[in-house]
Image (cartoon, rainbow, N blue to C red):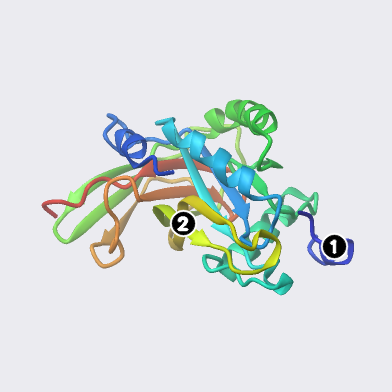
Amino acid sequence: MRLPSFAAALLAAVALPSVASAQQTASGQISCVLELYTSQGCSSCPPADQLLKSYLGRDDVLALSLNVDIWDRLGWPDTLAKHQFTERQRQYARSRGDGNVYTPQTVINGMAHAVGSDRAEIDQMIKATDAKKRSMAVALTFRPETGGLTLDAPAWLNASAAAVDATLWLVKFTPRIEVVIGRGENAGRTIAYHNVVRDLTAVGSWRGSAKSTALSRAALDGCTVGTCAVLLQQGGTGSILGAAWVPALAGI
């Protein structure tokens, strides 16, 4: 479901066990981040919402659903949407320089986009961005501290890269939410949304040198196994350089 041309011109699972298994891997690293921009008011989105669920079984993939409010005017205000996510999707289009904003849209590793219901296109973009992501990869690790965690980002080993100005995002999500749609294009349908992002907060920055960032227990409130991750991203909506599951908070 694409934005009207004039609007575009203005813009330059329940699969918790699988997610938890990723949490239990030795490194906790995530090699691919998928962000599905979806809307309850978009008739084209339910197949994409269902497809996203299929990626939750991959331990190396963080698949997120970000509901946007661009179709609320069609008669059904999206109950999961945040305008922050609408702006994030628009900023991605500006960062890429292509101006493409639509639903359902999947952003892959912060670098490319694909129609959210097209598995072949998404998988192609995963492969296309994988080599670049590996060449720039930053391994994020956690250390338990009294009252919280310390997130360590090492010095960047990408000698050929220019100076970097990256953002550390803490993302919190709910594994599965069912919504009964009362009006609009999906009226009468009950749709399941997976890994629904409820909070996306910048918790620090990174400029290529080794850096440690303290995350207090208050900042990590609501994080349980498989429901929180950290992203390291050029700018705020550029290439994702690193991602990791937030470990269990027991004992801190």
**Residue 113, image x and y in percent?**
69, 42
Which amino acid type is marked by label 1? Pro
Q: Quarter of the image holding residue 210?
A: top left
Which amino acid type is marked by label 2? Glu
Residue where numbered disc 2 is placed: 178
**Residue 116, image x and y in percent?**
66, 43
Q: Quadrant of the C terminus?
A: bottom left
Disc number placed over residue 81 in the picture, else none: none
Determine whether 216 is above or below 142 in the image. below
Q: Earlier in the sequence, mark 2 or mark 1?
A: 1
Tally of numbered discs: 2
Residue visible at 67% across and 54% down?
92
Is residue 191 or residue 198 the one in the foreground?
191
Find the residue positioned furthest to the left.
251
Residue where numbered disc 1 is placed: 4
Residue 37 visible to the viewer: yes
**Residue 75, image x and y in percent?**
69, 73
